Image (cartoon, grey):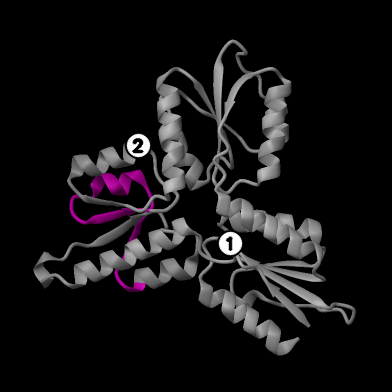
Amino acid sequence: MNVILAESAGFCFGVERAVNTVREQILLQQSKAEGERLPIYTYGSIIHNKQVVSDFENQGVLVIDSLEKLEQLKKGVVIIRSHGVAKNVYDIMEKNGVTCVDATCPFVKRIHKIVHTESEKGVSIIIVGNDGHPEVEGIKGWAVNRPVVIGSTEEALEFEGDKSKEYCIVSQTTFQNDKFQDIVDIFCKKDYNVNVVNTICNATHERQEEACKISENADIMIVIGDPQSSNSRKLFEICRKGCERTYFIQTLDDLHLEIPDSAKTVGITAGASTPNNIIEEVQSYVRRNF
């Protein structure tokens, strides 16, 4: 069996930076005298991977999962996750005097600045992405006016806005590039005055392109990622178009391959929040057993 592992599989720059930030804070607090140590929290799961989050919890890092709990916190170190947060989250931490360590991906930070700057000018904001996703929720929180979230071509076609207004269109960093372009085309054809800033991360685009190419030449495709991971789910959608036998798994325990005799090639890719040890475990298993 020929096994092809995507070169882009695994942690992206922003995720690796966030994970390393937590590790650094653990070491920093451990180096202090016992009475001087501060509890460590992350606002939301640091990345969308249960294994990584569980490992940090075993080392004493707790997850704050709501604004209400954050408002009650008066002492500790709070790490902002890679997805970023709304402006009011920073305001609450400053008011309470807790230490904020910002691990927001720089590419997401760029979107926050664009949205804040443009909305202050009176420009209406359109975010292309999955409403309810942590990154999108954070981006929404930097707009001065009320932003609109568009997640599909159907929603773009249904959108009825004021054509006398100016709009700025940005994207969730992990959104599928061709879908973003399709949505932008609809706004242009409907004669809206739009300024388009394609904020899809280059690493995301490259990962999706590579997954597409591998899947088109594979008899079986394996996508490794957390079900909560938006970019992992999009990889699965892309790969399933190119290869009917595409499996979406979180760990090796989820892998139940049915390989026909005619199969010659297995392709493997993984989302931006998937640790290398899980990828290597899956790859080694497939190489050994098929």
Q: In the rendering, at what x and y percent does residue 183 appear?
A: 69, 33
Which residue shows up at 74% across the image and 65% down it?
214
Q: Secondary structure at mark 1?
A: loop
Q: Which mark is residue 271?
A: 1
Q: Horizontal placement of 79 versus 82: left or right?
A: left
**How many numbered marks does the figure carry?**
2
Which quadrant holds residue 215? Answer: bottom right
Q: Which mark is residue 87?
A: 2
Q: Considering only vertical position in the picture, is 164 above or below 68?
A: above
Q: Quadrant of the N terminus?
A: bottom right
Which quadrant holds residue 56? Answer: bottom left
Which residue shows up at 59% across the image and 40% down it?
129
Between 151 and 175, the residue placed more toward the observer is 175
Q: Amino acid at mark 1?
A: Gly
Which residue shows up at 47% across the image and 40% down it?
137
The stretch of residues the image draws in magenta is 58-80
